[in-house]
Image: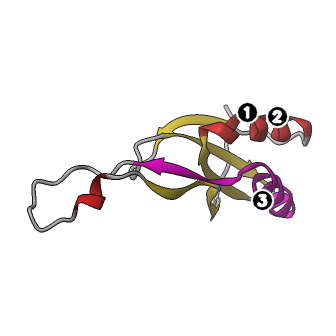
Amino acid sequence: MKMIIAIIQDKDSNVLSNAFIEANIRATKLSSTGGFLRSGNTTFLVGVDDDRVDDVLSIIKKTSHARGQFMTPQVSMDASMDASASYPVEVQVGGATVFVLPIEQFHQF
């Protein structure tokens, strides 16, 4: 048995949740926040048998998309910085960060 922890962008959350339901995959959905942009994320916890890991990873890959987003860097009072530092820059966000962990025991009470 494996525990899959998938951290995805909120924009992809409902699509992934619906895909899990259609594939009869039970998941726990947690609200989380990213550290870099402080944007909303969703973390899914999925416990599955070893033979279903590839199915779950395939669903996550199909439903979680990377996209560009503009952000404005924080203004620094450092005089050595050039004026272009305050203009928005495009960064890559989204996609999925996935961890697959072995599970020694599973109990349901």
Query: Which element type, helix, strand or loop, lies under badge 1?
Result: helix
The secondary structure that most of the magenta stretch takes on is helix
The residue identified by callout 1 is 14
Gap in angstroms between the C-alphas marked 2 and 1: 6 Å
Where are the magenta residues, as a range?
Answer: 50-71
Q: Colour scheme in the image?
A: secondary structure
Q: Nearer the viewer, residue 60 or 82?
A: 82
Image location (x, y in percent) of residue 83: 23, 59
Image location (x, y in percent) of residue 39: 46, 40
Above or below for 82 versus 87 = below
Tell me which amino acid carries mark 2: Asn
- Relative side of 49 to 92, left or right: right
Could you say which disc has been placed on residue 73 in the image?
A: none
Q: Nearer the viewer, residue 18 or 3?
A: 18
Image location (x, y in percent) of residue 18: 82, 34
Q: Nearer the viewer, residue 8 or 29?
A: 8
Above or below for 50 versus 67 = below
Could you say which disc has been placed on residue 18 in the image?
A: 2
The residue identified by callout 3 is 57
Classify the position of the C terminus by image quarter: top right
Gap in angstroms between the C-alphas marked 2 and 3: 15 Å
**Circles 2, 1 touching at the beta carbon (< 8 Å):** yes
Q: Nearer the viewer, residue 106 or 24?
A: 24
Q: How many marks?
A: 3
